[in-house]
């Protein structure tokens, strides 16, 4: 029987003619006739009789845009038998449509993991029988970060000579199209402390923050920005 590396060894054979055969359930058997007069190395390539396939699309569960497919997600597949990994792991990436696929798989139970920057790891299982063609989609959730904006007056100060917070100022946040934050557009108003908090943002996204036009009557307002921190 071959070991976990697919290697085998037969010892103490006499010189002569032999037939070597390799067989495994679900695969086409292979035989080779040899004349043994010294050490002989044989290599067999077994082909599955009915290979299985698993494919799917990886979606963003939280982004507020129409195009929800995730590009470049690392998808890993491992075959499991009796709790032990015996096949793989195999690895691929989602394409621009968020799609992935694994072909020519043996009938096994598999663990599937999906990983990409800014999202929580997603894990699932799939059982494949001979000839199966299974679709297994994945929905990933943002591993959120936040941006805090504080607006203060450059003119007025409080009793401790600190800049006075500006309340009820509308602030816009827009994700840049070439970053992980693309498609995120938010508007919020500053509270009594002059603070606006934008949560559930995708790291490491790039964002533009600006005061809305209807707030431009605040002449010379000064903005202090604390960049993303985990939530």
Image (spheres, helix red, strand yellow):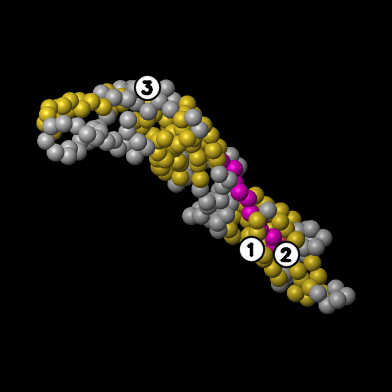
Number of marks in the rendered image = 3
- From the viewer's perspective, tell me whether residue 84 is left or right of residue 151: left
- From the viewer's perspective, tell me whether residue 223 is left or right of residue 30: right
**Vertical order, 164 against 47 (above or below):** below
**Residue matched to label 1:** 227
- Check residue 143 for magenta coloring: yes
Q: Residues within 10 Å of mark 1 (few under 14, many from 20)?
A: few
**Vertical order, 184 against 66 (above or below):** below
Q: Nearer the viewer, residue 212 or 157?
A: 157
Distance CA(mark 2)–CA(mark 3): 59 Å
**Residue matched to label 2:** 150
Image location (x, y in percent) of residue 62: 60, 42
Picture quarter containing residue 64? Answer: top right
Q: The magenta stretch spans which residues? A: 140-150
Residue ID at (63%, 50%): 144
The residue furthest right is 159
Q: Nearer the viewer, mark 2 or mark 3?
A: 3
Residue ID at (65%, 59%): 229
Q: Residues within 10 Å of mark 3 (few under 14, many from 20)?
A: some
Q: Nearer the viewer, mark 1 or mark 2?
A: 1
Distance CA(mark 1)–CA(mark 2): 11 Å
Q: Are marks 3 and 1 in contact (CB under 8 Å)?
A: no
Residue ID at (75%, 61%): 195
**Residue matched to label 3:** 131
Q: Earlier in the sequence, mark 3 or mark 1?
A: 3
The residue furthest bottom is 161
Q: Secondary structure at mark 3?
A: loop
Mainly helix, strand or loop, the magenta region? strand
- Check residue 227 for magenta coloring: no
């Amino acid at each position: 029987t071959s070991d976990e590396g697919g290697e085998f060894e037969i010892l103490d054979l006499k010189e002569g003619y032999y037939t070597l055969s390799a067989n495994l359930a679900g695969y086409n058997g292979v035989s080779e006739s040899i004349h043994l007069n010294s050490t002989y190395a044989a290599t067999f390539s077994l082909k599955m009789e009915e290979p299985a396939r698993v494919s799917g699309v990886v979606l963003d569960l939280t982004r507020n845009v129409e195009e929800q497919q995730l590009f470049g997600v690392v998808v890993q597949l491992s075959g499991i038998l009796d709790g032990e990994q015996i096949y793989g792991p195999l690895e691929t990436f989602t394409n621009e449509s968020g799609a992935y696929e694994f072909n020519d798989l043996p009938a096994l139970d598999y663990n599937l993991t999906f990983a990409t920057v800014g999202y929580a790891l997603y894990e699932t299982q799939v059982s494949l029988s001979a000839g199966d063609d299974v679709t297994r989609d994945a929905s990933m959730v943002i591993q959120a970060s936040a941006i805090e904006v504080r607006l203060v007056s450059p003119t007025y100060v409080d009793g401790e000579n600190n800049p006075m917070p500006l309340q009820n100022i509308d602030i816009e946040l827009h994700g840049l199209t070439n970053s992980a934050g693309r498609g995120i557009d938010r508007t919020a108003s500053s509270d009594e402390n002059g603070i606006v908090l934008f949560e559930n943002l995708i790291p490491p996204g790039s964002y533009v923050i600006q005061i809305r036009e209807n707030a431009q009557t605040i002449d010379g307002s000064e903005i202090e920005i604390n960049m993303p921190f985990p939530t």
